[in-house]
Image (spheres, helix red, strand yellow):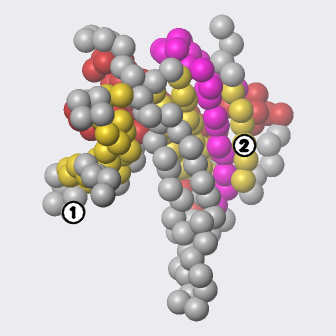
Amino acid sequence: MALNMDIYTKDLELTDRIKEYATKKVGKLDRFLSEIGECRVDLAYAKTARNASDRFIAQVTIRGKGFILRSEERADSIYAAIDATVDKMTRQIERFKGKHWRKRAPEVAEVAQLMPTEDIDEDEEPVIVRRKTFTLTPMDEQEALEQLLLLGHEDFFVFYNAETSKVNVLYRRRDGTYGLIDPIVG
């Protein structure tokens, strides 16, 4: 089965060589996890990076029924960044499969990724610049914590709590512990 892959670039020309290399390397991920439904590869060049060895950025996001995994790496060449990202994704897939396939196949929600906004002047009205929708799949609190760690989204994770039948937000506290927001409609 061929992996359905979309490649996007930012401040970087997508040459045939780069496209072929990324397709070859990222295409091998379906060997490790056959349930991948969609794969997105983002390649970028950050000319303002502090370190010259961190200018090329590769990010891979894979989605399947009930899961989403993402990895991002930076390097001094786009090829090295792709290699590092694929290696990191392979480790995430192994960890994901090891934790979940032993007991049962998971049903995991996709995460709303909020982009950092630039500073807003006090005179200007705040504007919503991006909206994102995602499917909430029922899971317990432990599965939500594991998914937060697997995705690399260390700040928060929105999920549908199967035990309480409510939408909850799991977040990382400053002291390294985790908190759970359990809203009540008033």
Task: State the residue at coordinates (54%, 69%).
Answer: 117
Q: Position of residue 44 (x, y in %)?
A: 67, 51
Which quarter of the image is occupied by the N terminus? top right
Q: Which residue is mark 1?
A: 174
Q: Residue furthest front?
A: 186
Label 1 amino acid?
Arg
Q: Which residue is mark 2?
A: 8
Magenta-span inclusion, residue 18: no
Label 2 amino acid?
Tyr
Q: Position of residue 119 (x, y in %)?
A: 53, 79
Q: Is residue 69 visible?
A: no
Q: Position of residue 175 (x, y in %)?
A: 16, 60
Q: Position of residue 25 (x, y in %)?
A: 62, 25
- In the image, 176: left or right of 43? left
Q: Is residue 159 above or below residue 46?
A: above
Q: Is residue 95 visible?
A: yes
Q: Quadrant of residue 38?
A: top right
Q: Earlier in the sequence, mark 1 or mark 2?
A: 2
Magenta-span inclusion, residue 24: yes
Task: State the residue at coordinates (39%, 22%).
Answer: 107
Q: Nearer the viewer, residue 63 or 109?
A: 109
Q: Callout 1 environment at 10 Å: few (<14), some (14 to 19), or many (20+)?
A: few
Q: Which residues are magenta?
A: 23-46
Task: State the residue at coordinates (69%, 27%).
Answer: 5
Q: Callout 2 environment at 10 Å: few (<14), some (14 to 19), or many (20+)?
A: some
- In the image, 17: left or right of 53? right
Q: Nearer the viewer, residue 40 or 81?
A: 40
